[in-house]
Image (cartoon, helix red, strand yellow):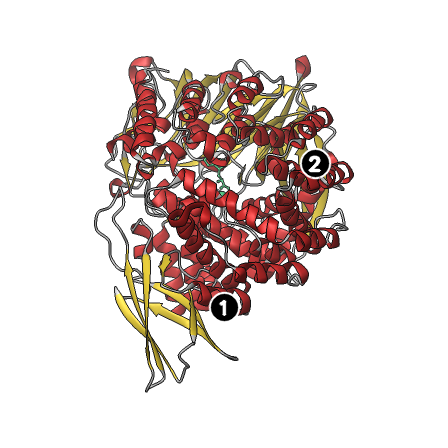
Amino acid sequence: MSADTNSRQVKRLADYQAPDFFIETTDLTFELAADKTLVTAVLQFRRANPNALELRLDGQQLLLLAVHYNERLLQPSEYQCDAQQLRLSVTDDDFKLTIKTEICPQANTALEGLYFANGSFCTQCEAEGFRRITYYLDRPDVLSVFSTTIIADANQYPYLLSNGNKVADRLLAGGQRLVRWQDPFPKPCYLFALVAGDFELRQDQYTTKSGRVVELAFYVEKGQGNKALFALEALKRSMRWDEERFGLEYDLDTYMVVAVDFFNMGAMENKGLNVFNSKYVLVSNNTATDTDFFNVESIIGHEYFHNWTGNRVTCRDWFQLSLKEGLTVFRDQEFSRDMGSATVNRIHAVQVIRTAQFAEDASPMAHPIQPQQVMEMNNFYTVTVYDKGAEVIRMLHTLLGEDGFQAGMRLYVQRHDGQAVTCEHFVQAMQDANHYDLSAFRRWYQQSGTPELRVQRSYDVHKQQLTLTLRQHTPATADQATKLPLVLPIRYQLVDGERSESGLFVMQLQEESLVFTDVSATALPVLLEDFSAPVRLLHDYSEQELLRIAKAASNGFARWDALQSCWMLWLQQYIQQGGAFHLPEALFELYATLLNQPLPDKSLTAELLKVPDYGTFAESFPQIPVDSILAASAAFRLQISEHLSKALLQCYQQHSQAAAEYNEEAVGQRALKNRCLDYLSMHHGDSQTLLEQQYHTASGMTDKLAVLKASLHSEHPVFESLMQHFANEWQQDVLVLDKWFSLHAANPTEQVFDTIAALCQHPKFSWQNPNRVRALFHAFAMQNPGQFHRLDGRGYQLLTQTLLLLDPINPQVAARLVTPLLSWHRYDSERQILIKQALRQLLEKDGISNDLYEKVSKALAG
Ligand code: TRP
Ligand code: ZN
């Protein structure tokens, strides 16, 4: 890579300028070969800015063969071409450029632009990958009507796919085939897609509410067709749901989904031609867990929902990414919620915010949901933009109500269909449709950081009045020193004996009070129900009060949340008292009740019975006491397993007959049973048969994997032999094998280093495949805190050496893996030194990518 492709340039939202030129039509021809693909782009331009004299097209890693201006071949002296741009002077208002470039898809291991992997061609253009295909105005506010001609070997690549409708298909001389596609909807180039390969095809139809028939087509690896059927059904459910809940209907005659093994992210919403990581399409009871099924349904929904929130209405620039992602995550969360256990879905979404998002806000990479400056856009596909973005949309929904929110959505789509807009346009539509002043609310878009909301209670016996004083404060973040008060929608419920009163309090100022009259001295307010604002709630509730909520609240989320607070109290007590600390009898009573009489929602019961994981505990500390958290978690699990062994076993047995299928009841039974198994496995002697029996008679992957996880977690000796068995059984299925890689990487003993070294030599491991790399190293860095944070630095060094090797292959994946090293300031001074040393090693590496450079340099500057 030449030095200037790596220019470390920061782009700012404040510098946005509308495009000088538009591209009205884009006609692409691909002559495909893995080692040498010829791309001919015929672009019809129209001047937008009368003062613009120079046209600057983006391009990266391209070999320029020829440029024609209208019909005239340009001489090299008539344009300038460097590693980033093609520039030429233009005086006409309307003109045509024909640009011929050559690219090498098989050398493209970054998996951005057009790449060749596993025998097929595939594109990934978001965010700025299209410039690796041809010279172009690679920005989302340039919308163009695309036609695509694909020419390739007819035998090797029976399917030649692109966006829109197929308009030509014929054989050419020399065994070549030509297929031509037209997409009637103008779109930015990041939504362009091309796929060529040999697949198994699964088809179906969907009739929209207005009676149009849409052809649905899933293209997956040969022999895997049956594993696409769940995703196909999930697509139909998504289409129906979007019509019913949002009144939005699909617009093209075909909807295609291609599953590929080599993919940087989860999936991509290319117009009419989604490309998916095969992990999020291919599921069967035997090979996929309940979580995998859940993810497939939610990601299928997510990409489908983008057709309106993202594609028909798109982003003006990449700083507006949350316009489509925050909104689409909100939509997919609502979809999942309507399909399964609403409470548990909310719990899982909140866990993402409280662990990963709060951590990001506390890190050197802190940014608002609408980032203000960016070096590498790929680095901003973050849990802040996506998940906090969705929380901001959810707050609008809470403030405006379902009807008001839907009115805002209708106005937004009606006003901006076919446009590239900003987050501001979205908020304005919500405001105008509801005549609701959202001016103060807009701060959520520009302000980073996690607000702290402190509650103080005072009770006036004479007036029988309870006053809550609420104070909000957002601590400074790495990117922003001063913070303003935010609009906080606070859902509350007051539990006072038999009586309960609920409502919504909209806090606007730094300090406000909330008064309840005619209440008893023991009245308990439950605040922030369903996590109605993404803040850290600080209260002084006692263990007894929290347990009262955990036992009695009518809202399942509130019960879970109260228990979470209890766990934080117990962890602090454990840290003060050490091994002498015992969990209170009241907890065992509550747990015994839950085990003997589970709630109707068994998934929720399983959540209530869970000791928070390492990440959840860690996030509550400014400086993370790694060893104490690990010791406490183990002690808590042991105490529960000892005190409740009978009830655990009974509950386990009562829920061991779940149907093999993926449905709410069966998923709940499995979750509950496997929660019990996790505790039971701590008694090594008694649980051996249980573990082996469940493993060998399991009706599906959920139950199998649960055994492996439980035995790993409790360091049960049966782990090794079952892992061996598992490897033999699943040799050929890489998606299943990824689970096995991850389990090995989470091994809490020092053995893990030799194991990982050996697994890198495994015939199915490949540094080129992001799923394999993540299965091993993401699992190591995130699910093995004991070994990752070793005081001899071996864990940090393993990740660092991995990143040095991976960065030249796939910088996008490398930059995601570096995340745990960025938060060095959250550890003790010994670990800080080790982590900073690792970061410096990365920074000193010659030719380090922009992706890694942006993160590592920020971390070291902080
Ligand atoms: N737009 C995709 C989504 O969220 C995200 C995505 C897929 C992506 N592949 C990518 C983002 C590659 C950046 C780079 O649905
Ligand atoms: Zn998305």
Q: Residues at badges 1 and 2 in contact (C-beta under 8 Å)? A: no
Task: From the top left corner, tell me how far across and down residue 20 is, in percent.
Answer: 30, 37
Q: Amino acid at mark 1?
A: Arg
Label 2: which secondary element: loop
Marker disc for residue 548: 1
From the viewer's perspective, tell me whether residue 76 is left or right of residue 758: left
Looking at the image, is 425 positioned above or below residue 633? below
Point 52% across, 51% down: residue: 348
Which residue occupies the extreme bottom position in the image?
A: 462
Q: Quadrant of residue 485?
A: bottom left
Instruction: Check the picture and name the quadrant holding the N terminus.
Output: top left
Density class for disc 1 (Cα within 10 Å; few <14, some 14-19, many ≥20) is: some
* Residue 746 visible in the shown view: yes
* Residue 248 visible in the shown view: no
Q: Disc 1 or 2, which lies upstream in sequence?
A: 2
Marker disc for residue 26: none
Point 70% across, 51% down: residue: 649
Task: From the top left corner, tell me how far across and down residue 664 is, in percent.
Answer: 67, 55
Q: Amino acid at mark 2?
A: Thr
Task: From the top left corner, tell me how far across and down residue 842 is, in percent.
Answer: 34, 22
Instruction: Check the picture and name the quadrant holding the C terminus.
Output: top left
Q: Which residue is mark 2?
A: 287
Density class for disc 2 (Cα within 10 Å; few <14, some 14-19, many ≥20) is: some
Looking at the image, is 494 positioned above or below residue 625? below
